[in-house]
Amino acid sequence: MSTEQLANMRRNYTRDGLLEEHAPLNPFVLFQRWLADAIATEQPPVEPNAMMLATVDAAGQPHCRVMLLKGLDERGFVFYSNYSSAKAQQINDQPAAALTFFWPALERQVRIEGSIEQVTAEESDAYYNVRPLGSRLGAWASAQSQPLACREDLETALALLEERFSDEQPPPRPDHWGGYRVLPKRIEFWQGRTCRLHDRLNYQVEGDGLWKRERLAP
Ligand SMILES: Cc1cc2nc3c(=O)[nH]c(=O)nc-3n(C[C@H](O)[C@H](O)[C@H](O)COP(=O)(O)O)c2cc1C
């Protein structure tokens, strides 16, 4: 792909707008509405609950990867991962995170920024226990983010676990696996418009704990 081809790639966004009169004062209400739209509209291979998670290490280097949103309420946005992974180390060093959702068919983006903490062991147990057996065993088999000599080692580890555990003999949740909740201080909704004059509504938590909404220039 040449620089010229990249420079000429562009879409004109005409699908929708985001005006204050349609935007509730509580950003969680708007997020739930947009997520429902995405689930109804986005076609596979897009996963509507996929989101970019950014964390920062102790040296200030940002790291970004895709996660799946697995829980949502007014406290925040929940995903599950390995508590010994690279991201877990970064979260331990700096308990701050940013999430970005991109819903291309809807020409929408949502950006979330805030602090991050582990969910309770009870919440992690509840989600672990509804995962398919293969995913539960995968959490045991993989030392996420660690170097692996070859793929075979991973498959051997899984095969050994499959001999030990089944749906009748279910594995317990590993201590090194569980949920995180991003507690937002800022949620920004972006709706693509024509001529790059996009709509951006930014919600920010004020000192009184209430959400303040303002429009940002695109
Ligand atoms: C669509 C998609 C969904 C993913 N969902 C998760 C997830 O929910 N949890 C997770 O730990 N990794 C998930 N991953 C893998 C992560 O992007 C990443 O590779 C992994 O968590 C290791 O990241 P780290 O080394 O920075 O800790 C997903 C990847 C993709 C492409």
Image (cartoon, helix red, strand yellow):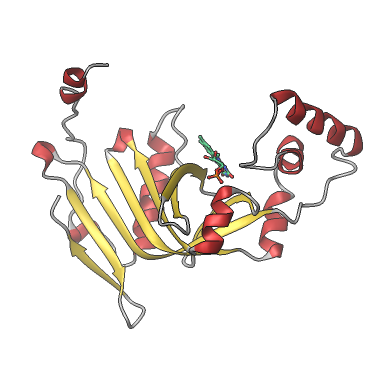
> Where 15 falls versus 214 (above or below)?
above
The residue lying toward the viewer, choosing from 81 and 195, is 81
Q: Residue furthest front?
A: 59
Residue 142, quarter of the rendered image: top right
147 vs 160, left or right, is left
Residue depicted at 35% across the width and 41% down the height:
102
- Is residue 49 visible to us here? no
Visible residue check, residue 109: yes
Q: Residue at x 68, y 33 (%)?
A: 148
Q: Residue at x 23, y 45 (%)?
A: 191
Q: Residue furthest bottom?
A: 208
Say if 149 sits above or below 141 in the image: above
On the image, the x and y values in percent for residue 110 come to 33, 50
Q: Nearer the viewer, residue 212 or 6?
A: 6
The x, y position of residue 3, in whole percent, is 20, 21
Residue 162: image quadrant is top right
Q: Is residue 127 left or right of residue 73?
A: right
Residue 197 in percent (x, y) is at 11, 44
Q: Is residue 10 found left or right of 59 in the rendered image?
A: left
- Please report the residue visible at 19 percent of the width from the left and 18 percent of the height from the top: 5
Image quadrant containing the N terminus:
top left
Residue 50 falls left or right of residue 171: left
Ligand 1 placement by image quarter: top right
How many numbered circles does the render carry? 0
